[in-house]
Image (spheres, grey):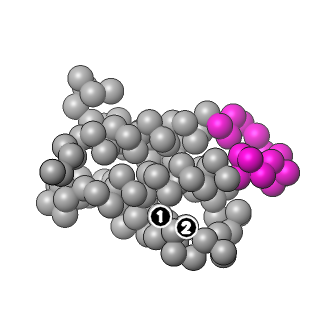
Amino acid sequence: MQKDNWVYVGHMLDMAQKGIQILGGKNREEYGRDETMQFALIHLVQVIGEAAQHRSPEFRKAYPQVPWHEVIGMRNRIVHDYLNVDEDVIWEVVHHDLPPLIETLKTILPPDLL
């Protein structure tokens, strides 16, 4: 049985916010020295992509402001090419891409689910 689309979108939002929380304002150098943080953020980015992938094509089409293709593509890259995960790319995703994704997800989620 397919879960409700909004459950997955809410999970994407939760995981993106958790990623920002874990990063905690650290700079790229601090991130590079913290292997535990790197593993955690890689996992969160993967989970966000997994949740996005489970959205129906109709749902994704209804909300084109969410970069579904990029989010799912990042998940696929992590899962299928895990030996070549680039820490600079993960840093960029968490530092630069998650904040606007969070804001976008907040605009599409029904208010009672925020």
Q: Residue at x 71, y 36 (%)?
A: 25
Q: Label 1 neighbourhood size at 10 Å, few (<14), some (14-19), many (20+)?
A: many
The reply to whether residue 28 is visible in this rendering is no
Q: x%, y% of residue 66? A: 34, 54
The picture quadrant where one finds residue 18 is top right
The reply to whether residue 69 is visible in this rendering is yes
Q: Residue at x 66, y 75 (%)?
A: 84
Q: Where residue 78 is drawn, which disc sits there?
A: 2
- Name the amino acid type tagged 1: Arg
Judged from the image, the secondary structure of the residue bearing numbered disc 2 is: helix
Q: How many marks?
A: 2
Q: x%, y% of residue 52? A: 34, 55
Q: x%, y% of residue 71? A: 43, 61
Q: Label 2 neighbourhood size at 10 Å, few (<14), some (14-19), many (20+)?
A: many
Q: Which residues are magenta?
A: 22-38
How far apart are the alpha carbons under marks 2 and 1?
5 Å
- Name the amino acid type tagged 2: Ile
Judged from the image, the secondary structure of the residue bearing numbered disc 1 is: helix
Residue 50 is covered by the magenta coloring: no
* Residue at the extreme top: 112
Quarter of the figure that contains the C terminus: top left
Whether residue 51 is situated above or below residue 9 in the rendered picture: below
Residue 28 is covered by the magenta coloring: yes
Q: Where residue 75 is drawn, which disc sits there?
A: 1
